Image: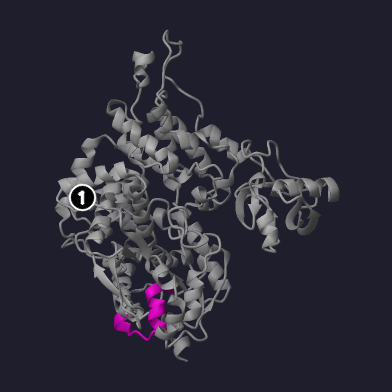
Amino acid sequence: MAATEPKHVAYYKGCLASLSAKELDISTQALAPKLGLELDELESVTCCGAGDIHEAEPDYYLHLNARILAYAEQTGSDTLMTICNVCTLNLRQANWQLKNDDELRARVSANLETVGAPPYEGTVEVKHLLWLIAEGDGYEQLKTVAHKGLKGLKIAPFYGCQILRPSKILGFEDPDKPWSLEAIIEACGGEPVDYPAKIKCCGFPIIQAREETALGELIQPIEQASEAGADAIVTPCPLCHLSLDAWQSKLKKSTGKDFAMPILHLSQLIGVAAGLEESELKFKRHVVSVEPMVEKLEA
Amino acid sequence: MDVALKIWRYNPQRGERELREYEVDAPDWACLLDVLDLIKDKHDGTLAYRKSCRMMICGSCGMRMDGRAILACKEPMKPIVEAGHVPTIAPMGNLPVVKDLVVDMEPFWGKVRAMKPWLDPGYDEVPEKERIVSQQQVNAIHKEALCIMCGCCVSECNSMESDPEFLGPAALAKGFRFVGDVRDQADISRLNEYNQEHGIWDCTRCYFCNERCPKGVDPRDAIAKLGAESIKQKVDHDMGAKHAKWFVTSAKTTGWLRETELVPKTQGTFSALKEIGFALNLAKRGKVPPPFPPHVAKDVKEARALHDLVRTQGREGAAGIVQGEKALSMIEHVLEADPDHAAASRIDPQQSGGKSGGD
């Protein structure tokens, strides 16, 4: 990708990458130029609502997301890049609604203009970083970027929900047989590990209101990836990351098992293979240590 | 065409489970249900499965093909045969297996019954005048009314797998079919019931239900509509509702999520304090961003003004959820044409008769 003209994309990092998952933003910004992506970070934007505003005040959800899309449109790029499953679904859902209904878009745009924001013309496509890498000839070019490789590492892909379902809104790949993470793991020189829970829920949306139910979901990918011999799990979503990484200690309490399964953001996994430094990867911000995986790679 | 299938057989007498392979000659137009009929007629009369209408309306033939819940009568076999694929057929998930592909639907029906799936018009005696409901008002519950109760959504519900008592997508979609019905007068008591422990806030938003529903009901969207109606009607005591409301507060004050305050705002300060050890462990890793100074978005005044503005436009609650597909334009139509009778507004039972129908 770096060989050709860089692709200029509007970049929406979302809440978590600005807060508890800063390492996601830092590693994405460090990696992007190597992947031929020129990130135009949006500043005048807010939270997408994370599905919660959609459920609490849905009309406000639609307007907040339309405002993000409108500011993305102002950058002149046709692509809004996300790095979070939940942002991806919320923005794509709003975009789908606004693009398919001129009257709705006219009302929302008029409201945006009333409060001093730009109107939305409906020209932007929302794409997750994962898709931007996996589509086209990204796979071949990733092989060059990932010069250091992931040799000898077994990596378990964890997609999470809201980058796959509902497919009528997301639609990048078959939600039951996704391939993009596996392709990237292979292009980076690692060995993808297969397990049934890779397309299931991490439990994060209800981890505060229904912790027990959420932990019953969370244990599946961790246990299955562990049994399949994975050295780490990689995920394209910072909410899945927080759930799998930070709440893993609670599984120890309920099951007596210490899985010690390192959880990597997508940008960190490619970053390791591309030889990024710790200052760009920020593994020290993880709750479960990534050291065993790094040591195995160095050995 | 020659069709090959693998079927998970289950013998309840012996408690044995076995994956058995079948090959049959079937016509090109055969769907999975036709192939099962052929197997039962010509090869193995002991195979058990449910069927009735053969045309996607009775909801009897829900089962799994390669792990996906489907209606056997809706799956054409030709593309599968042409791809050289041998699919695996299994009973639906999240329900006890009775025999082979037949599951016990009683837990499913129990949850549907718990929704009180009948109209409560708020009067005992039939009014003198006919009550007319406009097409637009029917549209507000159109998608939920399409449910054929096949159980495909329940089969893959991730929350139910973890909490078998969760009411689940089919029952809750049925619940919205009544909460969103302008003739029904029991919406507050319904919302209070659906807000209980295993109710709407148990949904983990995995979206398997929307993905699997063969009729386009989109049960997850119906659950969101129930959430929106609950918050609109101030039935917001559940931690899930408080969690959702905190995102609104965050967006209209700082623009970004006020992440560290989310836990005490959801669980209450006392409960949050019990988690202090867990929180300190996260804090060491920078996972508990300090709430002060707040992380404020640029031009956040626009987001604040938008909040005040959209509240005046009559799309609070479920009416604010864009339906999608064909229903979308119809829903917008009702609000434009008839702002006094927005989709979610109630009919006053005292004013029975044609006038209250929203025309």
Colouring method of the image: one colour
> Can you identify the residue that label 1 sits on?
B252
Q: Position of residue B291 (x, y in %)?
A: 21, 61
Can you see residue B125?
A: yes
Quarter where residue A277 is shown? bottom left
Q: Amino acid at mark 1?
A: Lys
Q: How many marks?
A: 1
Left or right placement of residue B20 versus residue A26 in this view? right
**Chain letter of disc 1?**
B
Asked if A67 appears above or below B174 in the picture, the reply is below
- Point out the stretch of residues depicted in magenta: A263-280
Q: Main secondary structure of the magenta part?
A: helix
Q: Is residue A9 left or right of residue A204?
A: left
Q: Residue B307: x, y in percent? A: 21, 45
Left of A257 or right of it: where is B359?
left
Disc 1 crowd, CA 10 A, few/some/many (<14, 14-19, 20+): many
Please tell me which residue is depicted at 54% across the width and 67% down the height of the picture: A223
* Vertical order, A57 against B123 (above or below): below
**Quadrant for the C terminus of chain B in the image:** top left
* Residue A255 seen: no
- The residue drawn where x is 31% and y is 44% is A102
**Location of the N terminus of chain B (image quadrant):** bottom right
Q: Is residue B245 above or below residue A134?
A: above
Q: Say if the magenta span includes residue B208.
A: no
Task: Return the x and y of residue B184 as percentages of the image width and height.
Answer: 42, 24
Residue shown at 20%/50% (left/top)? B252
Q: Is residue A272 magenta?
A: yes
Mark 1 lies on a secondary structure that is helix
* Residue depicted at 39% across the width and 61% down the height: A85
Task: Locate residue A155, reporting x and y percent.
Answer: 50, 76
